[in-house]
Structures are given as C-alpha cells and as structure tokens.
Amino acid sequence: MDVTIRKATNADAAGISAIWEIIVAERKFSAVRRAWSADEQVAYLNRLSAREATFVADAGDRIVAFQTLDRWVIYPSFMDHVGQLGTFVLPEWRGQRVGQRLAHAMFAFTRSHEYQKLVIWVRESNTAAQQFYARLGFRECGRLSRQLMINDSYDGEVLMERFL
C-alpha cells in the first residue's frame, strides 16, 4: 500500500496518538512510558518552532508512521545547527521503507532550515533501529549504560549522529 509523506497538522494528532499507544504498549522499541493523548499531541505540534517539524506517513485511511525533529537544545544558540530525530512506525509497516521515506523528507526539511547535524538516541537493545539509522548515514558516537529502567530491567542508550 502506498503512503503520502507530509508535514503533520493538528488534524493528525489522533492518528499520531494511536501510534504512540501501540509503541508504548510494546515496551521494547521506545523508552517512552506513557502515550500522549490527541490533545497533548496538538499542544506539542503547536509548540514547535518554524525550525522543528513532525512528518507523517499517511496511508489514506490512517497515519502509519511519524518522525519528529526537535532542536537539540532551545538555548544556547551555539547548538542551533543540531537537531534531534525520532522515528515511530506501526509494527505492520516496519521494513517497508516508510521510515526511510520519512527520513528523506525530514533531511530536505533540515537542510532548508540550516541544520548541519542530526542526533538520535536509540535503545541499546533495539539493534534493528541502530541498523536503520546506520543505513541512513548515522554513526554511533556514544553509549550510556543502564540509562533506562523498563519492566524492571536496565537498558542502555546509543547516541548516533549524522552530518548533513
């Protein structure tokens, strides 16, 4: 099935929230503990600066994936060139290049908004995500051991970066 990649609007909040519900329930690909409601998602979208974005993969009848770009830090300004990425794909859509298509749209957005570097935190146990980001040109640049406590077990985080 084909999808359209586009910048998210407030009308997409319920679809994005539905993806959060599924990913949070899996408890293995994200460190997020609680899914945002549609209202919280609208508030997030409305808080984004002109240099931040959420892109969605729209299958026509529902949102099947989304990717976020936030500034690495709000201040100090000497890190304005760095953005933080996050990618979230419904289980049945993983491995179908939806994440890759989202990333290419986001890369175009980041270049047009003067980013020079992207970073992503990936759970140490999520080797599929590490491989996904490596295929996109990210490289590992650091690790934090026992950074997360999920289901009474520790997991580390891998920091990856990509220069644009």
Image: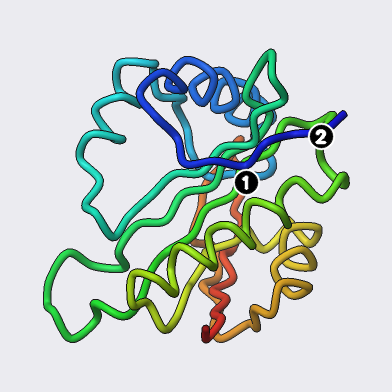
Decide: is 106 above or below 33.
Answer: below
Residue 30, horizontal then vertical, whole percent: 59, 44
**In this rendering, would 133 be left or right of 9?**
right
Residue 114, horizontal then vertical, whole percent: 33, 77
**In this rendering, would 8 be left or right of 136?**
left
Which corner quadrant of the image does residue 134 belong to?
Answer: bottom right
Q: Amino acid at mark 1?
A: Ser
Identified at 54% across, 67% down, the residue is 107
Front residue of 130/105: it is 105
Q: Are marks 2 and 1 in contact (CB under 8 Å)?
A: no
Colouring used for the render: rainbow
Identified at 63% across, 31% down, the residue is 23
Q: Which residue is mark 2?
A: 93
Identified at 30% across, 24% down, the residue is 42
Element on which disc 2 rests = helix
Identified at 61% across, 35% down, the residue is 151
Q: Which residue is mark 1?
A: 153
Front residue of 148/134: it is 134
* Structural crowding at the residue carrying mark 2, measured as other residues with C-alpha within 10 Å and reported as few (<14), some (14–19) or many (≥20): few
Element on which disc 1 rests = strand
Residue 143, horizontal then vertical, whole percent: 56, 77
